[in-house]
Amino acid sequence: MESLCGDSGKRGTSYRVISRAPGNRRHTIRLGRVNKRIAETARLMIESLESAKAAGHSPDRETAEWVGRLGDEIHSRLARAGLVPPREQTSTTIVTPGHHLEHLFGSLGKHKPTTARNYARARRLLEEFFGKDRTLDSITEGDADAYKRWLLASYAPASASVDLRRALQFLKAAVRRRLIAVNPFAEVPCGPQVNDDRIYYVTVEDIEQVIAACPDSDWRLIFALPRYGGLRFPSEVENLKWSDVDWENSRFTVHEKKVEHHPSRGRRVVPIFEASMPHLERAYRERAPGAVHVVPRTRHGANLGTQAKRIIEKAGVKPWPKLFVNMRGNCSDDLERQGVAEKAINAWVGNTARMRQRHYHAVRPEDWAAVTGKSVRFPARPTSFSGVQEPSSLHRAREKSPDVEDDPKIDYPRQGSNL
């Protein structure tokens, strides 16, 4: 049981808390000249720390926040009494951005390859502008403004915005570690992270023409799954397995590698839309014996973007920016315009409506036609392309196994409009 004692003097009353730890060991924590209300609060918090230590538990949230607000002197007295761990002493060697970031990245644990690459880029830019020997506490708000101007002179506004936000994040961590008093980037406007000029709508006509020019089933699915299923490429496409496909209920399970670290994320169930069903069925029939993954080509670690552009050009279509990101966005755009419930789109695509509107949705030719009075039509099933397929028995009769082929000369249907 902690007791509060006060010693009156000419300059006021000094308080101290006397506690008895297990083993009848006595600790005295001097609080200095404070009013009695503050001293009583301190006594209750110290009593809570003693109880938590005796039970082998962490202190409750209120007590932990109180400890975090303490000055170094009182905190050191609690540490000497064994009630809290000592605070990390600021090392004179951790003063440059490089030293701070090395410590920060090490404390965050293992990163995904893309995150590690982005962090390395942010560190390189900070050290390139400020220099490797520049101390953190010498960076001012004016230096932060100059860094923003330097980024905008070298990179697109969206890329500069991303790097500014990382600088803000890194220096905020330095404030929390008490390496600097204020964050010089706190008041710097970062700007939007979206480049509207790179948002593009890939029409059904164009994507069908590209799919018809693909050399095999792997490539057909590389285009069909993002455009007609809303899958992220390559992470969600490369991890899709045949065991994830539920043919009976026309759906499959997607493993969300990008967001698996978020609570309640890591997988979602997506319908097999009518537009993507023929391509998925054909790939199943043509799979190699014992094949596990739906698109094995994506498992080789190669960058498929260059080859994808060649296929697009071969089909007579001009390659669009952000090949796979825009196709994924077009899928959610089509679903929304066809009146599918927002909650269903969120669940199937794995993004919120705000995120889709901000990063994915483009103005389509039909939108221009709606206000100019000129009709624009894109045929859903072009007939001039090679490789036209006939409806498969699997698509009509779901009770049959995909392994059973009624007619060995069967063709496959052309892709229809996305549902």
Image: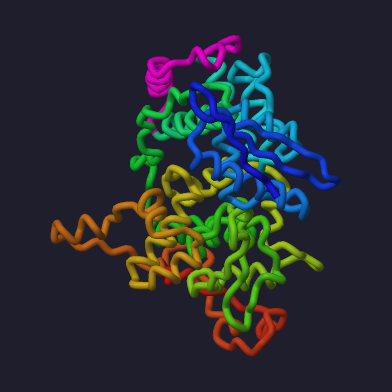
Q: Residue at x 27, y 55 (%)?
A: 365
Q: x, y percentage for residue 195?
A: 37, 39
| 196 up-or-down from 173: above or below | below
Q: Quadrant of residue 114?
A: top right
| 302 up-or-down from 385: above or below | above
Q: Residue at x 38, y 72 (%)?
A: 340
Query: Looking at the image, how many numbered discs can be counted on the residues?
Result: 0
Magenta segment, which residues?
130-157
Magenta stretch, main secondary structure, is: helix
Q: x, y percentage for residue 334?
A: 38, 64
Q: Quadrant of residue 240?
A: bottom right
Q: x, y percentage for residue 252?
A: 61, 71
Residue 335 visible in the picture: yes
Q: Nearer the viewer, residue 151 or 278?
A: 151
Q: Is residue 177 left or right of residue 182?
A: right
Q: Quadrant of residue 134?
A: top right
Q: Nearer the viewer, residue 271 or 398?
A: 271
Residue 170 visible in the picture: no
Q: Residue at x 53, y 24 (%)?
A: 9
Q: Is residue 415 magenta?
A: no
Q: Nearer the viewer, residue 233 or 204?
A: 233
Q: Residue at x 33, y 66 (%)?
A: 337
Q: x, y percentage for residue 327?
A: 46, 54
Q: Is residue 145 magenta?
A: yes
